Amino acid sequence: MNRREVLKNVALAGGGFIVLPTWAEAWSLNTLQRSASYLSLEHEAMLVSVVDTIIPTTDTPGAKDLGVPDFIQKMLLDCYEKDVQENLKKGLEKTNAMAKDRYLRAFVDCNSLQRKDILGKVAMSADQTQKDYLTLIKSLTILGFSTSEYVLTNY
């Protein structure tokens, strides 16, 4: 990655946080008001599995339990262009294809170690769009988890 790309990404991320919608502050499932999903049911299940792999449930609720997948979809619809949304769909499809090639089962049917392995392979991929899709999901997962009402009120 060259310096210009890094600076562009930092500027975009900074701008995104400046214009972060007001609903994204201490949000909860009650305040999210889920609109129609732009993802298919298969893509939604994949997104839930990826988010659950990034921040799993332990003795505290994980990202899936707090509704972070719905937060991510709302953020993508409200704050990102169509090409980013399409890249996410393609990334989910490629991740699922990697799981089928490696473990002969869909990503959602893999255990947590297999999911971590697949996401590690995506992160190390030579395909920059795959890396970008995973980076976006990771950053939105962390943002959604850390700004959820549950985390802000309990931690």
Image: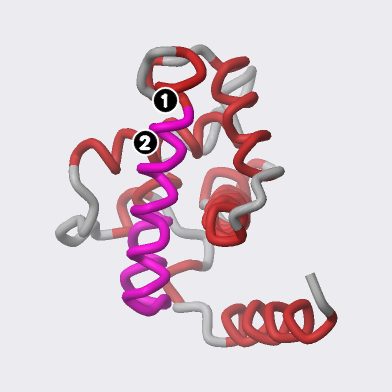
Is any atom of residue 65 visible in this view?
A: no
Task: Give the distance between the C-alpha atoms of the residues marked 1 and 2, in whole angstroms.
Answer: 7 Å
Residue at horizontal 49 percent and vertical 36 percent from the top: 50
The amino acid on which the numbered mark 2 sits, given as a three-letter code, is: Met
Lower sequence index among marks 1 and 2: 2
Residue 39: within the magenta?
no
Image coordinates for residue 76, horizontal then vertical, percent: 38, 67
Q: Which residue is mark 1?
A: 107
Nearest to the observer: residue 97 or residue 11:
97
Is any atom of residue 75 visible in this view?
A: yes
Quadrant of the frame with the N terminus: bottom right
Residue at horizontal 60 percent and vertical 41 percent from the top: 122
Q: Which residue is mark 2?
A: 46
The residue carrying pointer 2 sits among few (fewer than 14), some (14 to 19) or many (20 or more) residues within 10 Å by Cα, namely many
Nearest to the observer: residue 4 or residue 48:
4
On the picture, is 119 further left or further right than 39? right
The amino acid on which the numbered mark 1 sits, given as a three-letter code, is: Phe
Q: Main secondary structure of the magenta part?
A: helix
On the picture, is 1 further left or further right than 133? right
Residue at horizontal 61 percent and vertical 60 percent from the top: 128
Residue at horizontal 50 percent and vertical 39 percent from the top: 51
> In the image, which residues are magenta?
71-98
Image coordinates for residue 88, horizontal then vertical, percent: 41, 57
Q: Is residue 82 above or below residue 60?
A: below
**Tag 1 and tag 2, C-beta contact below 8 Å:** yes
For residue 59, which quarter of the picture? top right
The furthest residue to the left: 36
Nearest to the observer: residue 77 or residue 127:
127
